[in-house]
Amino acid sequence: MDALPPISASTRWDIAGMVVSAACMVHCAVLPVAVVALPAVVGRWERVEGPLGWGFLAVAVVVAGVALARGFARHRHRFPLVSGASGLMALAAAERLGESALAAAVALAGGGALLAAHLVNRRLVRAEVACDCPQCRNEGGSRSAR
């Protein structure tokens, strides 16, 4: 059997980011249904939900920051950074909105943007393709594919 190639640290951070983003999206999608379906736990849940949501956001900021910065250093594409930052801002806005349908929708959109950022970042790192946008060509920052 052929041995699997080693997984780079950047890829590990992107995988962790995808897992955190997906967990956050499931949490945000299931929570409103669970609160409606289980009114007996609502009083207890409100004391836990605030710190849990901010905890998800803190983990997402650290993981996304490391993964996307490391990826950008290799491939120089801006999309993962912009998508990741947008997703993190949407998640923070959703936390500030509290428990509402709007907050859940904003959180799902933010989690989706963050997940997309990690997926694209991972593909770019694996392909090791440099940015070929007009701005990078003007700066001379484009690297050839390896």
Image: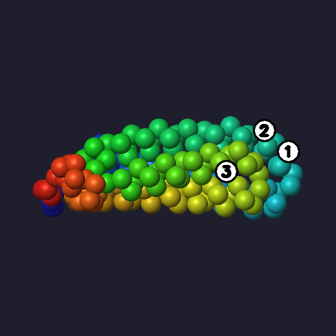
Foreground disc of the pair 3, 1? 3
**9 horizontally vs 97: left or right:** left
Image coordinates for residue 17, horizontal then vertical, percent: 44, 49
Image coordinates for residue 98, horizontal then vertical, percent: 75, 48
At 69% across and 58% down in the image, what residue appears? Answer: 104
Q: To which residue does mark 3 refer?
A: 94
Image coordinates for residue 125, horizontal then vertical, percent: 27, 53
| Kind of residue at badge 3 | Ala
In the picture, the quarter occupied by the C terminus is bottom left
| Kind of residue at badge 1 | Gly
The foreground one among 142 and 125 is 142
Q: Are marks 2 and 1 in contact (CB under 8 Å)?
A: yes
Foreground disc of the pair 2, 3? 3
The CA span between labels 3 and 1 is: 20 Å
The CA span between labels 2 and 1 is: 7 Å
As helix, strand or loop, the secondary structure at mark 3 comes to helix
As helix, strand or loop, the secondary structure at mark 1 comes to helix
Q: Badge 3 local density, few (<14 within 10 Å), some, or many (20+)?
A: many
At 85% across and 44% down in the image, what residue appears? Answer: 43
Q: To which residue does mark 1 refer?
A: 43
Q: Badge 1 local density, few (<14 within 10 Å), some, or many (20+)?
A: few
Q: Residue 106: which quarter of the image? A: bottom right
